[in-house]
């Protein structure tokens, strides 16, 4: 891939060591910035909708998760390829799509929270707008027979309706005070049924005409769960999927009563009822396709697909293929494969759909044991390496490694902190990639209420993990993994009710920092960002300091050549002496707005210290260079999300989905 080399004019400003931020920058020396390439592309499918073209051709409508922008794809099911793609301005992905009775496709998008409609016959995409400026994600499309479109919003937990005749939105308001996520919406009769959650899982009924909300309590013990993430209706029964336990509940809509649960399900929904027999199909947590008789309640194994990844949507379609008479069960999965099973013959097959993947925003950067630079993808995940010595770049098999929030090289291994489920993987890059064993999990912290491993450090032969808790929960943790024994010890509460978001090691001691913000979907108590020292052998906190009372997070830490710590907080870059626990100096940097956000964690690697002591920091998308002797701050370039110091002495930084190299 050709590289783009630019001379970057930097802007310098001598700044006073007082609050209020840096002075206006002035021109300074130039540096060489090289565009290395796009390390990760994925075919990542969150949801699909099935429909038919005017000539009757069965198609799949889906939107891939992208970086900066993305496209709606129309996929010919029988040919297994995308036959049309339409860019969606202002969207990077979609959590739901639905086809109206008149064939119009509706698309609920993020991160601007826009609703779109698409007409295949005229190839017309219409931006219907935002139902509210407070909403950034739209979820769960349900369509009434009269064409009214219902959907939910995040982070407000609101229910909205769109009237296509009038071209107007209706706001039904927040459906549960403790819910920021309204994940799923279905229409049944004159009511909307919605699944919500963050702090507590909620299932509610909304009268369409009056807007009256009626809570439907979940049966014990499921009433203690934190979120309903999918609701599907099949033959007057609502199938309600829970996020944490992955249990599929069943609710009789006519009798208004809970039925015997379906049990754990790997997929989010169930199929429409089989045209051959009164069964719904679903994917079990073991990855196998199973069938539930709606007459007897019995579940049987179909024998098809012993290791299905998951299902993003089902349909019954005549494939017009030998061995697949009548209608076959068609499913798509997260990585763009089409699974087809014919109940009459028992024939099954899996094919990769022909779709051009989307570039993936780089979430994290790290340097591996052999000096290669590794990049982890946001949202749809993915992992790739770049070799500075050869210029080579390669992505590991798609659909394996999820979103990597942090990386750490220890000996010949590369540890990967991945989301969701708080899983830490160990990977030896010198050996063949075998998903499940290399890399393989060494810690899964979801059972301890942890979801995002934001911090990794190695000391005293242990790997120390700092985490953000699950959705709707307080209290992050420090966890210690001992490779010698395989043991994992979890210490919740070491960060108070907040999260542990950064960690470094000096000798046998780990130094970590905290944020008051915990899991998404819960308002945290007021608290200060702190720095603390932790002994991974005795698993005790040695000391703790609050560098700047009143500031709720210390987002980054890095070690200086002299053994002090550099930290980053709102409007300040600071140096901390770990022996005296005193702040040695402060360097003002632009202050990010933390007053109107739902969280502040460690969003990628944002501090790098050169051997000569020069500090590079990412603040508000700007890569800043700080001369720690003079206090001069230089704006090097913008649009940056992460930066690491490579083994070759160059800085590697991410701009959206593109990796760059900067020679200091």
Image (spheres, grey):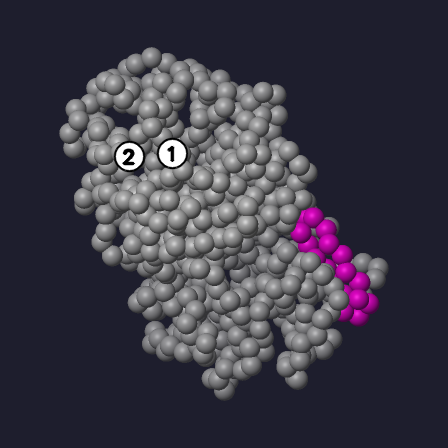
Please check the rendered image and state whether residue 347 is part of the magenta-colored stretch, yes or no.
Answer: yes
Identify the image quadrant of residue 577.
Answer: top left
Real-space CA distance between mark 2 and mark 1, rounded to the nearest whole angstrom: 10 Å
Q: Is residue 553 visible?
A: no
In this rendering, would 551 be left or right of 50?
left
What residue do we see at 35% from left, 40% from top? Answer: 511
Q: Quadrant of the N terminus?
A: top right
What percent of the width, then of the height, locates residue 194?
Answer: 43, 70
Image location of residue 535, percent across then percent down: 37, 44
Which residue sits at x=21%, y=19%?
Answer: 14
Q: Which residues are magenta?
A: 337-353
Circles 2 and 1: CB distance less than 8 Å? yes
**On screen, 435 above or below 28?**
below
Which residue does the numbered mark 1 point to in the structure image?
Answer: 506
Q: Residue 520, how many percent across, how many down? A: 37, 55
Residue drawn 33% across and 28% down?
Answer: 563
User: Helix, strand or loop at disc 1?
Assistant: strand
Regarding residue 219, the answer to whether it shows in the image is: yes
Who comes first in sequence, dot 2 or dot 1?
1
Query: Is residue 18 or residue 594 the one in the foreground?
Result: 18
Looking at the image, which residue sits at the far right?
322
Residue 34 vertical position relative to residue 247 in the rendered view, above or below: above
Q: In the rendered structure, does residue 23 fall within the stretch colored magenta?
A: no
Query: Which label belongs to residue 578?
Result: 2
- Residue in view at x 32 percent, y 51 percent: 495
Q: Secondary structure at mark 2?
A: loop
């Amino acid at each position: 891939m050709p590289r783009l080399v630019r001379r970057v004019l930097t802007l310098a400003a001598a700044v006073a060591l007082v609050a209020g931020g840096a002075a206006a920058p002035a021109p300074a020396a130039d540096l060489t910035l090289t565009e290395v390439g796009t390390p990760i592309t994925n075919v990542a499918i969150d949801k699909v909708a099935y429909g038919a073209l005017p000539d009757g051709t069965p198609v799949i409508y889906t939107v891939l998760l992208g970086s900066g922008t993305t496209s709606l794809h129309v996929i010919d099911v029988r040919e297994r390829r995308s036959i049309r793609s339409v860019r969606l301005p202002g969207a990077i992905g979609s959590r739901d799509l639905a086809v109206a009775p008149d064939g119009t496709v509706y698309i609920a998008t993020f991160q601007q929270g826009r609703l779109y409609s698409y007409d295949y016959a005229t190839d017309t995409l219409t931006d219907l707008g935002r139902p509210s400026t407070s909403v950034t994600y739209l979820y769960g499309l349900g369509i009434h027979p009269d064409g009214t479109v219902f959907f939910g919003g995040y982070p407000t937990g609101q229910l909205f309706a769109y009237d296509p005749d009038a071209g107007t939105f209706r706001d039904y308001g927040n459906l549960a005070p403790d819910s920021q996520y309204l994940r799923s919406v279905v229409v049944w009769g004159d009511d909307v049924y919605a699944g919500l959650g963050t702090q507590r899982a909620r299932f509610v009924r909304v009268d369409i005409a009056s807007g009256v909300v009626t809570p439907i309590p979940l049966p014990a013990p499921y009433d203690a769960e934190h979120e309903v993430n999918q609701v599907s209706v099949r033959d007057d029964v609502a199938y309600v999927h829970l996020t944490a336990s992955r249990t599929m509940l069943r609710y009789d809509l006519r009798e208004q009563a809970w039925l015997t649960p379906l049990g754990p399900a790997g997929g989010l929904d169930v199929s429409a009822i089989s045209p051959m027999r009164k069964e719904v199909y679903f994917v079990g947590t073991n990855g196998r396709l199973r069938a539930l008789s709606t007459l007897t309640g019995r579940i049987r194994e179909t024998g098809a697909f012993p290791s299905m990844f998951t299902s993003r949507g089902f349909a019954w379609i005549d494939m017009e293929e030998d061995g697949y008479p009548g209608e076959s069960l068609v499913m798509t999965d997260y990585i763009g494969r089409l699974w087809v099973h014919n109940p009459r013959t028992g024939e099954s097959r899996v094919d990769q759909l022909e779709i051009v993947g989307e570039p993936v925003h780089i979430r994290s950067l790290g340097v591996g044991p052999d000096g290669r630079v590794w990049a982890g993808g946001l949202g749809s995940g993915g992992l790739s390496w770049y070799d500075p010595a050869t210029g080579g770049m390669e992505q590991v098999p798609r659909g394996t490694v999820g979103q990597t929030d942090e990386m750490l090289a220890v000996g010949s291994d590369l540890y990967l902190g991945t989301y969701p489920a708080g899983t830490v993987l160990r990977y030896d890059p010198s050996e063949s990639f075998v998903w499940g064993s290399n890399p393989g999990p060494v810690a899964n912290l979801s059972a301890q209420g942890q979801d995002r491993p934001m911090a990794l450090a190695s000391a005293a032969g242990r790997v120390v993990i700092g985490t953000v808790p699950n959705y709707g929960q307080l209290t992050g943790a420090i966890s210690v993994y001992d490779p010698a024994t395989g043991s994992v010890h979890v210490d919740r509460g070491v960060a108070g009710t907040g999260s542990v978001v950064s960690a470094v090691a000096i000798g046998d001691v780990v130094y970590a920092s905290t944020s008051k913000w915990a899991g998404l979907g819960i308002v945290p108590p007021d608290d200060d960002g702190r720095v603390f020292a932790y002994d991974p052998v005795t698993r005790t906190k040695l000391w703790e300091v609050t560098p700047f009372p009143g500031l709720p997070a210390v987002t980054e830490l890095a070690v200086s050549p002299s053994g002090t710590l550099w930290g980053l907080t709102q409007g300040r870059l600071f140096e901390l002496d770990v022996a005296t626990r005193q702040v040695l100096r402060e360097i003002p940097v632009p202050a990010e707005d933390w007053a109107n956000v739902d969280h502040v964690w460690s969003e990628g690697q944002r501090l790098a210290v050169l051997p000569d002591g020069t500090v590079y920091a990412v603040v508000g998308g700007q890569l800043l260079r700080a001369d720690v002797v003079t206090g001069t701050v230089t704006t090097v370039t913008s649009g940056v999300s992460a930066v690491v110091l490579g083994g070759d002495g160059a800085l590697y930084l991410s701009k959206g989905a593109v990796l760059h190299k900067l020679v200091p």
